[in-house]
Image (cartoon, coloured by chain):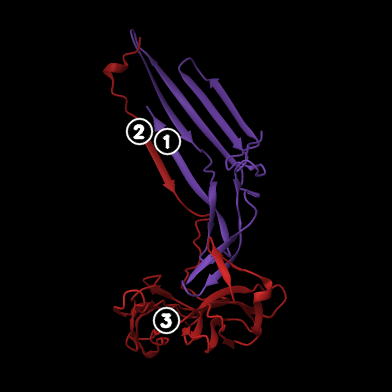
């Protein structure tokens, strides 16, 4: 006869839950620059009138020796569905050129222009990176917009293998503009993202008001950032 | 086995997210002595369908990578397999009986995939494996 009621059932259950990925390796940090990488497309001016010509510049990084190729295209009207961009019609697409920087004449129809860039090393089997940017039309009487400029960049600390240095950046003052819907003045918020080709940043990822960050330099013999 | 669904009246049938075509469970038991028993269970199940990310576009305005998905449920995770072993010891008294057991689940530490992990720009992927080693005893 069982006497389970007189015994507390001691259930020792040890579950070790680990979440490795394949062989416990992690992917490289988003802020680590490796191979070919596009870190941004700059439009100058960032907002344009229908009469403006916009200078588009690809800001990229490449640690190889092959030449790079660029294929710019623009679409006069597109849609974004679930994050994916589609040009409404192939007749609305046209090439802008194959240089790191190209010029775009804004549409006289008064529409935002979608720009796509296919870029990468010019070598057999090398993949191209697809980048897109929306060049926005400046509304009515809105004040002109300018891209921020880095006024100074400072490295503090001993620059030696394995050491940690502080990185500081100063930009020009945020612009103040009038919100078209409310008419109220708004000061733009500048966002900073730090990248490095060597070592590790702390914090490991940034996209905010991180005007300062720390960089642990790689050890002796490793690639300098 | 096959499990399919369709999204809406006129849509084509597609593989269900939990379509597992083969499911094998083998159970064994052996009485060593009147009070000692050994048991084991082995399971093998086809991996569930999954939708791969085949490409990505970098959105310069938002600083995010937007994935491009392949055909829905056109790929499969790797198969699930697991071995559980158990040993029981019976204690027989005059008027009552106690059984103690040790159950080791996932005895050879199979890292079964429960999904796919991607890096920040979706250029690399790995099975998202969850390793569980469970010891139970009473």
CA gap between label 2 and label 3 equals 49 Å
Quick one: A51 or A219, which is closer to the camera? Answer: A51
Within 10 Å of disc 1 (Cα), the crowding (few <14, some 14-19, many 20+) is: some
Q: Are marks 2 and 3 on the same chain?
A: yes
Q: Quadrant of residue A190?
A: bottom left
Task: Give the chain letter at badge 3.
Answer: A
CA gap between label 2 and label 1 equals 8 Å
- Secondary structure beneath dot 2 equals strand
Q: Which residue is mark 1?
A: B135
Q: Which label's residue is closer to the chain start, 2 or 3?
A: 2
- Secondary structure beneath dot 1 equals strand
Q: Which residue is mark 2?
A: A12
Question: Which chain's colour is purple?
Answer: B
Residue contact at pointers 2 and 1, CB within 8 angstroms? yes
Q: Which residue is mark 3?
A: A161
Identify the hue of chain A. Answer: red
Looking at the image, residue B49 lies above or below residue A130: above
Q: Are marks 2 and 1 on the same chain?
A: no
């Amino acid at each position: 006869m069982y006497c389970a009621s007189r015994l507390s059932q001691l259930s020792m259950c040890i579950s070790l839950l680990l979440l490795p990925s394949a062989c416990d390796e992690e992917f490289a940090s988003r802020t680590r620059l490796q191979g070919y990488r596009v870190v941004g497309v700059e439009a100058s001016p960032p907002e344009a009138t229908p009469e403006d010509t916009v200078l588009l510049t690809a800001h990229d990084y490449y640690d190889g020796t092959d030449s790079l190729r660029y294929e710019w295209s623009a679409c006069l009207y597109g849609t974004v569905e679930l994050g994916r961009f589609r040009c409404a019609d192939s007749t609305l697409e046209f090439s802008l050129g194959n240089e790191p920087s190209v010029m775009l004449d804004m549409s006289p129809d008064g529409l935002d222009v979608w720009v796509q860039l296919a870029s990468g090393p010019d070598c057999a089997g090398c993949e191209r990176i697809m980048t897109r940017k929306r060049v926005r039309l400046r509304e009515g009487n809105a004040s002109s917009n300018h891209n921020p400029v880095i006024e100074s960049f400072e490295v503090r600390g001993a620059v030696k293998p394995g050491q940690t240095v502080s990185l500081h950046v100063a930009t020009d003052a945020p612009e103040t503009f009038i919100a078209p819907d409310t008419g109220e003045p708004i000061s733009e918020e500048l966002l900073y993202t730090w990248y490095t080709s060597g070592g590790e940043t702390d914090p490991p990822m940034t996209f905010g008001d991180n005007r300062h960050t720390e960089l642990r330099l790689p050890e002796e013999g490793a690639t300098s950032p | 086995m096959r499990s399919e669904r369709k999204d809406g009246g006129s849509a084509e049938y597609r593989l269900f997210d939990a379509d597992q075509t083969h499911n094998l469970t083998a159970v064994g038991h052996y009485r060593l002595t009147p009070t000692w028993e050994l048991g084991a269970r082995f399971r093998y199940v086809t991996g569930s369908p999954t939708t791969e990310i085949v490409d990505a576009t970098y959105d310069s305005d938002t600083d995010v990578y937007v994935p491009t998905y392949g055909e829905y449920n056109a790929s499969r995770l790797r198969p699930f397999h697991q071995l559980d072993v158990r040993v029981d010891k019976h204690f027989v008294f005059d008027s009552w009986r106690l059984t103690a057991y040790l159950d080791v689940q996932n005895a050879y530490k199979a890292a079964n995939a429960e999904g796919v992990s991607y890096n920040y720009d979706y250029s690399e992927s790995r099975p998202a494996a969850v390793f569980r080693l469970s010891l139970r005893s009473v």
